[in-house]
Image (tube, rainbow, N blue to C red):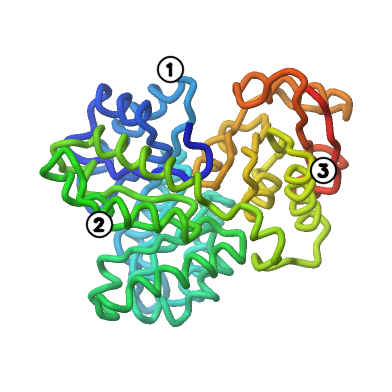
Amino acid sequence: MRIHSKIVCTLGPVSSSPEIIENMIKAGMDIARLNLSYGNYEEHARTISIIRSISEKLGEPAGVMLDLPGYKRRRGGIVEVFRDQLEFASEQDADFIALSFITSAEQVSEIRDLLNTIDPQKPLIVKIEQEKALENSKGIIEVSDGIMVARGDLALEISIEKVPLAQKRLIREANQRGKPVITATQMLESMVRFPQPTRAEATDVSNAVLDGSDAVMLSEETAIGKYPVESVAMMNRIAMEAETALPYHEVLEIGSYGLLPEVDDATARAACQIAHQIDAKAIITFTAGGTTAMRVSKYRPQQPIIAVTPSQKVVNRLTLSWGVVSVKKHEFNVLEEVFELAKQSALETGIVKKGELIVITAGIPLKVPGQTNLLKVERV
């Protein structure tokens, strides 16, 4: 069972039917990516409706990412067509918005300001695909909710031999800030035409996982390829195998992932350290907005992170966060109820058995985002 790394799949002509989407979710798709450069709003709305319906039927979270065409502006600010795309993303309740051809943190902030007038707190994923964006990567990561290493266009900008090291650097920078990072482009490209990838492609996916990617992405393989479901299943198999070799505890031991002088960050790291030391089977996070689970995810524990939340939006948003399995529960108001819900949720996922240890983390007062300050060890 793949727990840690996530799979993003681009939908297209060969993968927009209910049957194919259902089989892709079953094969391991965590997030469906729709590219607004192709098709029209009516087609995309229909596809999103299918994704939501099948996700609910299967009881499996499936995030929706809308990939917007390139950043545009005129004198006076962002053009109205860009506002139109953001409004469509809001109307469809997309879980993530991906931004193309961004070159600076200022551009991200400008788009964020516009988005805040339409749908505040919608996650922005910035595609790093230009040399200028690579130069400004730290600032871009700081103001975004995650990045995508778009290796195709990036290779045209910086020359192909520099892409592998750029990929590793971008993943490391995103990891240090606790921001999700997606590695994308030509990962299993031969599966556009053939039912098996090359050995080099399998190695590429494995190395992306080992480098620290939160997610790996399929593009043409699932959008126009002959084997969309098989591509997802293959990526799932490769990622699962790579996860067996991840150096889970090095992050905690060397403290290389950007320690912050904040209570919630320290609590998240401590939860991972305790879980490792006592061989707990899972870390249970109670999260109103997803922040607690993402904080724990930053420290890459070997144990699955079970995020308990009353919000379906949060469940969908956490489909991009490394190591997180989300469980939707009713609102929790009493601390003792939290502990019982933790045990119940751990058992429901099938990850934890009776008699095993779990580490619980939450915030007091309850339901206040960004207040992670409680740790408790329980035996289920």
Residue situated in front as seen by the camera: 49 or 226? 226
Image location of residue 4, percent across then percent down: 53, 43
Indicate the quadrant where residue 269 lies.
bottom right
Of badges 2 and 1, the one in the foreground is 2
Q: Residue at x 79, y 40 (%)?
A: 278
Tag 1: residue type?
Lys
Residue situated in front as seen by the camera: 282 or 32? 282
Circle 1 sits on which residue? 57
Real-space CA distance between mark 1 and mark 3, rounded to the nearest whole angstrom: 32 Å
Left or right: 67 in relation to 349: left
Q: In the displayed structure, would residue 362 be above or below residue 152?
A: above
3 or 2: tag closer to the N-terminus:
2
Circle 3 sits on which residue? 363
Label 3 neighbourhood size at 10 Å, few (<14), some (14-19), many (20+)? Answer: many
Residue situated in front as seen by the camera: 235 or 313? 235
Query: At numbered mark 1, what does the secondary structure look like: helix, strand or loop?
Result: helix
Q: Residue at x 25, y 27 (%)?
A: 20
Tag 3: residue type?
Gly
Indicate the quadrant where residue 225 lies.
top left
Circle 2 sits on which residue? 200
Q: In the displayed structure, would residue 330 be above or below residue 256?
A: above
1 or 3: tag closer to the N-terminus:
1
Left or right: 84 in relation to 42: right
